[in-house]
Image (cartoon, grey):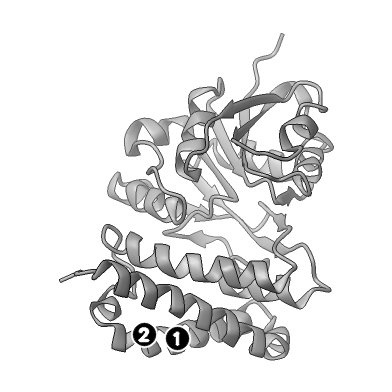
Amino acid sequence: MMEPIISVIIPTHNSEATIKRCIQSITSQTYPTEKFEIIVVDDGSNDNTVKIAKETKGVLVIQTEPCTLGHARNIGFKNSRTKFLAYIDSDCEAREGWLETIAKELETNQAITGPIENGFKKNLTSWTEYLFEFSDFHEYRNRSTTPFLPGCNQAITKECYNIAGEYPDSHLAEDVFFGSLLKQAGITAYFIPELQIRHLGVTKLNKLLSKMELYGRFTVRNSKTYDSIYKKMFKSRWRIPEVFFVKIGARAIRAKRSKNFSIFIICLPLMILATTKFCIGIWKELKNHHTNLN
């Protein structure tokens, strides 16, 4: 019997609305089923996520106590039995050819990512989240090196773990930290246009705003160990307006590059609202914890 080549690792938490679509996007591909395995790592869901994941024959479902996203990714790695590791989040769908591209590209490269599309193109809240988080990873971007591998769409060789180390034990930005580890280890990551997924993002405004505030809080916490472009601005709460304008300006530039500038203009009121909540998260974190990043 042929041994699998690719381990598809899917971390989950209360993902009953999307996990079935995620798994089906993998199992329905033309890549031979005997050449890949699917590992779902669920960190304490209290909905039907685990039940739905187990409905697909052959899927290995690992249940663990609530943990960080980084730790869940590492659990998947430790239970894999292949030389290639593919990570996709439970709120995403792989496009056809995703597995074939991974198998081909990882023969010569050690770490790859690719385009992330908005899966709910008729929803302005979803577009706002997409423009805020993923617009730099668009389908018009050419093949190129990249310092950052989004956790929702990345593939690496198992050797990367042996050289760079495991994912940091972090809820947010664990993929940014891991990209930094790869760089320190001398591993070059590549953006591959054919490695495409759809992100089935947030569609309700209240959930997006809560996420943005939390994102702001974790951005401050993570900046203690990761040299982000905002680090100098976090030395004073009174520099937070600079963060606001830098964030909006950068998203406008990315929207233009991804040919979504008209959508950006339509979503601008929501972008302003989301960025404001992001900055409120930063303000609260700096105020409550008296952060000193000098």
Q: Secondary structure under badge 2?
A: helix
Identify the residue under disc 1. Answer: 244
User: In the displayed structure, would residue 167 be above or below residue 216?
Assistant: above
Q: Residue at x 66, y 76 (%)?
A: 128
Whether residue 207 sits left or right of residue 106 in the image: it is right
Of residues 253 and 232, the one drawn nearer to the viewer in this rendering = 232
State which quarter of the image contains the N terminus: top right
Q: Residue at x 77, y 30 (%)?
A: 51
User: In the displayed structure, would residue 55 be above or below residue 219?
Assistant: above
What amino acid is found at the position of numbered circle 1 in the picture? Phe
What amino acid is found at the position of numbered circle 2 in the picture? Ile
In the image, which disc is placed on residue 123? Answer: none
Whether residue 131 sits left or right of residue 168 in the image: it is right
Q: Residues within 10 Å of mark 2 (few under 14, many from 20)?
A: some
State which quarter of the image contains the C terminus: bottom left
Q: Is residue 176 visible?
A: yes
Q: Secondary structure under badge 1?
A: helix
In the image, which disc is placed on residue 240? Answer: 2
Q: Residue at x 37, y 78 (%)?
A: 283
Q: Is residue 136 visible?
A: no
Residue 208 place in picture, x, y as percent: 63, 69
Total count of labels: 2
Q: State if disc 2 and disc 1 touch (CB < 8 Å).
A: yes
Q: Residue at x 39, y 90 (%)?
A: 241
Of residues 229 and 259, the one drawn nearer to the viewer in this rendering = 229
